[in-house]
Structure formats: structure tokens, C-alpha cells
Amino acid sequence: MSDAAERPHKLGPLRLTLGTMRRHVLVYYLASVTALVLFTFAPQAQPFVLTELLDIAASDQGVLSGNVALFSEIVILASIGLWGVVSDRLGRRIVFGAGFLFMGLGLRLTASVDSVLELYLYRGVFALGAAAATTMLATVVADYVIDEDRGKATGIGGIGNGLGALITVFVLLQLPALFIDNGSTPIEAAQRTYVIAAAVGLGAALAMWVGLRARTQAQREQQKPWTVRAREGFAAGRDPGVALAYAAAFVSRGDFAIVGTFFTLWVTTYGTTEAGLTTAEALAAGGIVIGVSQGIVLVAAPLFGVMADRLNRVTSVLIALAVSSIGYGSTLLVDNPLGGMIYVSAMLIGLGEISGLIASGVLIAQQAPREIRGSVIGVFSFFGAVGVMTATGVGGQLFDKWRPQGPFVLFSVLAAIVFVWGLTIRHRIVPLNEDVDPAELGH
């Protein structure tokens, strides 16, 4: 039977794998929107919690925010491989739903936080869910869409990412000020906002359990221990294309963490200490900056997804790294994060963020040997987690001890280093999972 006969279903421009229905893909994209709502909300709403619920001084919030995010990534790093194994044994929808359930639970607990220790614990619960959801976002798209359309599929997912972030910015992050205007205390406003966010997580969990595809025969046959998967994944890094994808994952996931953790914190601390804003007003102002950044994501994601399918995928990664380096470095030109220049930086950062996530994802899909794809994607996620740990751990110190632009400058430099390295090895990268004219390699 021909490949075309084996893949009778399409969703717009996407050709689906055997057994995948359109509704499965639509539920997956619902997950991409909802996951980004929660991923974005947790770090961006945290300045309000630090100020109003825990009474942390603004001068100490950078290090604390970085340390909390670092702890979250340690939890993610420790659990992400386990979630991958569980998804093979019990099914993607079980793990996806559990991820949203844990994230919702973590947010609900945060609504009643009254100590820094509790904040760490509750973010740890959230991180368990984020690890599951992150693993499934990368894995399910590989299950549902054929390799040749992966760039377009990831680009459409990027639209979902942008929508999710915008929902956070223009809905959830505006709720504290709205509640306060209607008579709530700041503490009550924070609690009600977090309860609403937790309800979003629970609703998404139910949608995943009901709407995603059941286990496939291939998943039933994937019973390798996580230690074997790890060895396979790291060994695959001998391929220069896989190695470049791992490095790009480090940078792109770190970029995403910096936006989530430090952009709003920068605006919020400046607004409350320099501009005379209340915490709720500063949080809303920070949300607008994030909204500009994610608005660019919404527009650029499908365009870059198409480009990633049409260009040499190494070229796509190099373009993304260059844009990221320029965008994050441009924050050095911003003195006032409430002024006009911040929006220029926000747009460049949004473009670099989404292009990096898409380009690294399609490159690893191209270079991962089919028989160990799960292992390679697991290590790809590992390097992304290490990037987030670097961004939050080192970035938090730079934010408080040097300047608020410190985390952004750090990843501008790292992106530039990976870009230069990528240029030196691009001629050695041979696509594995698609038919490419050898004359096109390196161009």
C-alpha cells in the first residue's frame, strides 16, 4: 500500500499519520494554547505573589525568582524522562492530562501560599505537570504529523503559543487590577486569579483524557528503560546535526524562560520602585510588554514554520540564533522598561524566541534516527531544561547584582556563540529523515 493510501487524513496543509484523526490534532492544538497560558502565567504572575502575599523586597525578587525557576527546572529535569517512559506504557493522553492536572494543582496551592518554602514546594508541583506537558507537546506532534509537514505543524503550534501567551497577558494578568477595582484586597485579588488559572488546568486535563488518541501499537512496543534512552540520545549527539539541535534547544528554551521570568519582573520592579505604580498596575503594564512580544509570535510562527520546511533546516536554525542574539542584546539600549524602546526589543525577542523553538524542533525531527526518536527527543528536552536552569540560575544573579538586562545579555552572547559554531559545522550536516539533493547541503 502506498504512503498516500496509508495517510488518508489531512488537516488543512498537514498530512496526518496513519490512525490520527483531525479531532486528535485539534485537541493537541488546544493543549498548545492552554499549556502556554499556564507556562506563561506561573512566572509572570509571581511578582504579584512575592510583593502582596509574601512581602518580599523588590531588591531581592530577582534572585528569588531565578532560584524558584531554577528549582522548577531541576524538578522538570528529574521527571521529564520518567514522563516519557510513562507515556509509552500508559499512553500520551494519560500523561498529557496528568500534566495539566499537576499544573492546576500547583497554581491552586499557590493561591494560599504564606512562606517562601511553600512557594518552592508549590512551584515544584507545577513543574511536575510542566515536565509532562512539555514532553507531550514535542512527542505528540511527532506522532500525529508526517515528517515532511513538521515545520508547518510546529508553526501552527506556535500560533497556539502566541494565543496562549496573549490570553495570559490580556486576561489573566489583568484580573488582579480588575478585582482590586471592584473592592478586593490585593491578597484576595491574587488568590482569585490563581484559582481561575487552576480551573483552566483542570479543564485542559479533562479535554486531554477525552480527546487525544489512544496508545498506538508502536508506543506499546517502546518499553526501553530511561537509562537506555538516555544513552541512545546522548550517543546520537555524535551527529553534528543532532548536536546543533541540542545546542539550539539550550538557547531557545533559555530564551523562553528569560521572557517568562524576567521580562515582567523587570517592568514590575521598575514600575513600583521608580514610576510610582501599584503592584497590580505594574503587573498589567508588564503584561502589555509581553503582549507585544507574543503578538509577534502569533504573526511570525506560521511564516517561520513554512520557511523551516522550505529552507535548509540548518539555515533556519542559524537565522533564528542570529535574530535571538540581536533581540536579546538590544535590551542594553533600554533604560526605561515602560518607555517606547522596550517594545522594539520585545518584538525582536518574540521573533527570536519563536523562530528558535520552531527551528530547533524541526531540525531534531529531521536528524533523529526514526528507531530512537523518543530517546533523542528526550535528550533534546534535557538540553532545553539545562538552558532554562542556566537562564534562571545565572540570570537571577545578573538581574539583582548587575542590571535587569543581565539575563537577556547572557543569552544574546550564548546565541552568538552557537551561531558561530553552527556556521563552522553546517557543511557536515546530512539530513536523515527527508530526501534532499546533496548539492543543497550547506546552502
Image (cartoon, rainbow, N blue to C red):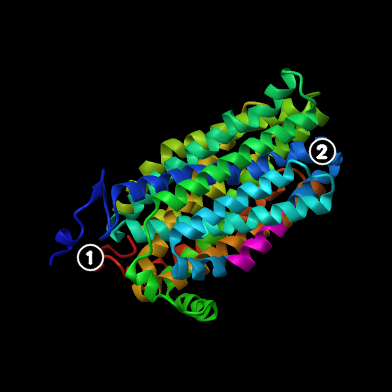
**Helix, strand or loop for the magenta stretch, by majority:** helix
The residue at 52%/37% (across/down) is 294
**Picture layout, residue 43 above or below residue 382:** above
Residue nearest the observer in this picture, 1 or 366: 1
Residue 74 within the segment the image draws in magenta:
yes
The mark closer to the camera, 2 or 1, is 2
Q: Which residue is mark 2?
A: 53
Residue 78 within the segment the image draws in magenta:
yes
Residue 232: percent from left, percent from top: 47, 79
Mark 2, Cα crowd under 10 Å, few <14 / some 14-19 / many 20+, is many
Q: Secondary structure at mark 1?
A: loop
Q: Secondary structure at mark 2?
A: helix
Q: Which residue is mark 1?
A: 437
Does the rendering let one see residue 14? yes
Q: How many marks?
A: 2
Distance from Cα at disc 2 to Cα at disc 1:
59 Å
The residue at 77%/30% (across/down) is 188
Range shown magenta: 68-79
Q: Disc 2 marks which amino acid?
A: Leu
Residue 409: percent from left, percent from top: 66, 49
